[in-house]
Image (cartoon, helix red, strand yellow):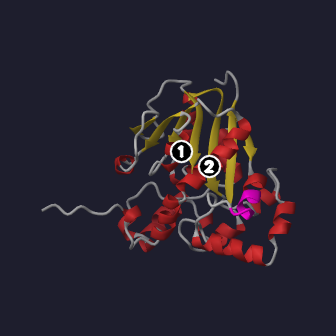
Amino acid sequence: MEIKKEPYWNSETHPNYHRWKRGREIAAYRAAFLRSILEKEIELKGKVILDIGSGIGGTASVLSETNTCISLDISFMKLRSQDESPSMHRVCADGRFLPFRPGTFDVIILQDVIEHIDHAERVLNEVFHVLKDSGLIYISSPNKFSSANIIADPHWGLPLVSLFSRPCIKKYVLPLLRKSERNRDDFAALYSINTIKKFIGDQGCLKLWTSFATSELFKGNKGIIWSDFHLKLMQVVKFFRFHLLYLKWVNDDFGLITWIYTPTFYITVKKKKNYS
């Protein structure tokens, strides 16, 4: 009799089980938050959307209610758990080799994905290749240098790990803390805003949504954070009314506040016309 092994993201013994479980439970809130940003930039209804690294498909499922949405993930097991609909189609592929024609998509989503990808710059080059002229990219990714993430990395729950490079995490963190996952390539290693800008290069124009995200966070939007540490930190900040200072100081510039404060970057990138 064959014994099927539970995927690591569904195993209650995994250190991140409860955080991932909460992430699945609030998938609709996350999708609604993402949609609210996209709709500030474009008329979203009727667009053709690609969701890269779609996971369990929560975002793709919500967006497919009014759009044609391709849900792409490298994990066939995760894709199998998704509910397919007439306007949502599942594709198992590597983001470094997107199987689509140039200029296919109006919107491409990289939601909490690029920090899990080795050679993220290559993936973004592929993204621009299959994106229409003036098309929109949505990127969310934790900030390498955020003070909150330095205290407790959102993926590992440990201090200072956010500052580690991908090779260091592969060499030291995985063998010590996650022996069963030491051969994984999709582990998280965070980027700075300057690195993300470097990945984009001159292919598109970046816009930060830090002010909007902060405002939504303190209004109680459930689709923004789900790490236990960061949820507790937000409660402390609100209890001492420090959030009033955050709301006053936070901005969408690429300066010091963004560098050290912003826990997660929420970014839209508009592709430049006729970029070659």
Residue 110 x %, y %: 57, 45
Mark 2 Cα-neighbour bin, 10 Å: few <14, some 14–19, many ≥20:
some
Q: Of the residues under marks 1 and 2, which one precedes in the sequence?
A: 2
Q: Is residue 165 above or below residue 127?
A: below
Examine the structure image and report whether residue 219 is included in the region drawn in magenta: yes
Q: Secondary structure at mark 2?
A: helix
- Is residue 259 at all visible to an observer of this figure? yes
Q: As rendered, which of 8 and 176 lies closer to the eye?
A: 8
What is the magenta range?
A: 214-220
What residue lies at 59% left-to-right and 55% top-to-bottom?
29
Disc 1 from disc 2: Cα separation: 8 Å
What residue lies at 55% left-to-right and 52% top-to-bottom?
28
Mark 1 Cα-neighbour bin, 10 Å: few <14, some 14–19, many ≥20:
some
Residue 194 circle label: none
Residue 62 circle label: 1
Q: Please identify the quarter of the rendering in which residue 150 is found.
A: bottom right
State the predominant SS element of the stretch in magenta: helix
Work out which quarter of the rendered image holds the N terminus and state it: bottom left
What residue lies at 35% left-to-right and 47% top-to-bottom?
80
Q: Amino acid at mark 1?
A: Val
Q: Please identify the quarter of the rendering in which residue 6 is found.
A: bottom left
Kindly give the residue lying farthest to the left in the view shown.
1
Residue 32 circle label: 2
Examine the structure image and report whether residue 56 is included in the region drawn in magenta: no
